[in-house]
Image (tube, rainbow, N blue to C red):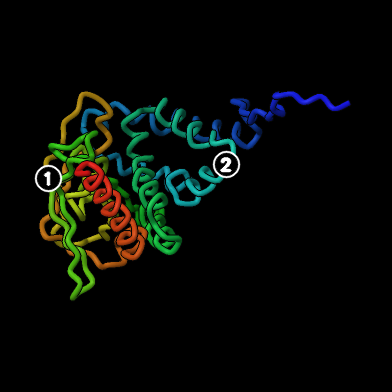
């Protein structure tokens, strides 16, 4: 006799644990030691100076903490705990210095989220440089009149097909490492009519003419981390600096325009 039931087979709940493995405990101890011996003793000075603590960043680079390799290994951790552990220990030393060391990861996240494998390989290492030549990354979306409301971005990117270049204009604000970074990843509007669906992310390489630091902000806290405006005045970047590539962008914009057209037609029906 077969008895039918409506019961669904039990599904296995994904296991998550905050218990650290041996490698994570060693990383925690290592970063804590750096925070205790290097960051904390210097915290008051750099907070008062409100300047990027370059000597501390150099020390972090020497031991491999400020490096592409460390970030790569941390992101590869399947538990997702390595980066929070490192951040927690660094920021225990000082939040401003901690963000000065980890701020480039914001730029890295923008590249990894939007870029091709070739762009990731080209640009992510340049967000850190080497112990002998420290480099930084910055990621910018917010603008004076568009903070969390990213659909209101006014900064524009216009494609110059004759030169295969993008021309960038506008102002970004509240940007960590803004204006002093070597690599800037900036989100701009390429089709204002599509609002947030008409945005694209661009890499601005080191030394590109037209990009400058605007106002540097004085803050109540986290003052060793540089926060400033990024001003774009007819900044020209090669077509290859569009993260993800133009073919992918064109396809995405076409889908967005088609969806907008369908909504308009439905409203008129």
Looking at the rendered structure, the number of numbered marks drawn on it comes to 2
Q: Which residue is mark 1?
A: 214
Would you identify the image quadrant in which residue 6 lies? Answer: top right
Disc 2 element: loop
Judged by depth in the image, the label closer to the viewer, 2 or 1, is: 2
Q: Which mark is residue 126?
A: none
Label 2 Cα neighbours within 10 Å, binned few <14 / some 14-19 / many ≥20: few
Q: Nearer the viewer, residue 55 or 93?
A: 93
Q: Nearer the viewer, residue 129 or 59?
A: 129
Quadrant containing the N terminus is: top right
Q: Is residue 201 above or below residue 152?
A: below
Image position, residue 23 (x, y; %): 63, 37
Q: Nearer the viewer, residue 263 or 78?
A: 263
Q: Is residue 223 above or below residue 140?
A: above
Residue shown at 54% from the left, 36% from the top: 80
Image position, residue 58 (x, y; %): 37, 46
Residue shown at 16% from the left, 55% from the top: 211
- Gap in Å between the C-alphas at discs 2 and 1? 38 Å
Label 1 Cα neighbours within 10 Å, binned few <14 / some 14-19 / many ≥20: some
Quadrant containing the C terminus is: top left
Residue that protrudes farthest toward the bottom in the picture: 162
Q: Are marks 2 and 1 in contact (CB under 8 Å)?
A: no
Residue 114 appearing in the image: yes
Residue shown at 32% from the left, 59% from the top: 249
Q: Is residue 132 above or below residue 267?
A: below
Q: Which residue is mark 2?
A: 77
Image position, residue 213 (x, y; %): 15, 48
N-terminal label among 2 and 1: 2
Residue 33 appearing in the image: no
Image position, residue 54 (x, y; %): 30, 44
Disc 1 element: strand
Q: Is residue 222 left or right of residue 25?
A: left
């Amino acid at each position: 006799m077969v008895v039918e039931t409506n019961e669904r087979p039990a599904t296995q709940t994904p296991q998550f644990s905050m218990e650290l493995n041996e490698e994570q405990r060693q990383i925690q101890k290592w970063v804590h030691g750096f925070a205790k011996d290097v960051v904390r003793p210097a915290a008051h000075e750099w907070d008062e100076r409100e300047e990027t603590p370059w000597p501390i960043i150099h020390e972090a680079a020497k031991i491999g903490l400020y490096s592409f390799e460390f970030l790569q290994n941390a992101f590869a951790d399947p538990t997702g705990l390595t980066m929070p552990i490192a951040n927690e220990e660094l920021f225990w030393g000082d939040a401003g210095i901690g963000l000065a060391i980890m701020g480039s990861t914001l730029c890295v996240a923008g590249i990894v989220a939007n870029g091709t494998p070739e762009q990731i390989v080209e640009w992510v290492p340049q967000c850190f440089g080497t112990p002998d030549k420290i480099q930084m990354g910055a990621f910018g979306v917010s603008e004076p009149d568009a903070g969390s409301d990213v659909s209101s971005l006014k900064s524009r990117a216009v494609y110059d097909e004759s030169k295969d270049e993008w021309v960038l204009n506008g102002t970004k604000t509240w940007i960590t490492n803004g204006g002093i970074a070597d690599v800037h990843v900036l989100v701009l509007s390429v089709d204002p009519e599509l609002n947030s669906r008409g945005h694209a992310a661009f890499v601005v390489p080191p030394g590109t003419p037209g990009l400058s630091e605007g106002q540097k902000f004085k803050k109540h806290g986290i003052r060793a981390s540089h926060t400033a405006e990024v001003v774009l005045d007819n900044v020209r970047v090669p077509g290859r600096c569009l993260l993800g590539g133009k073919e992918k962008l064109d396809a995405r914009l076409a889908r967005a325009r088609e969806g907008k057209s369908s909504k308009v037609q439905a409203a008129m029906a």
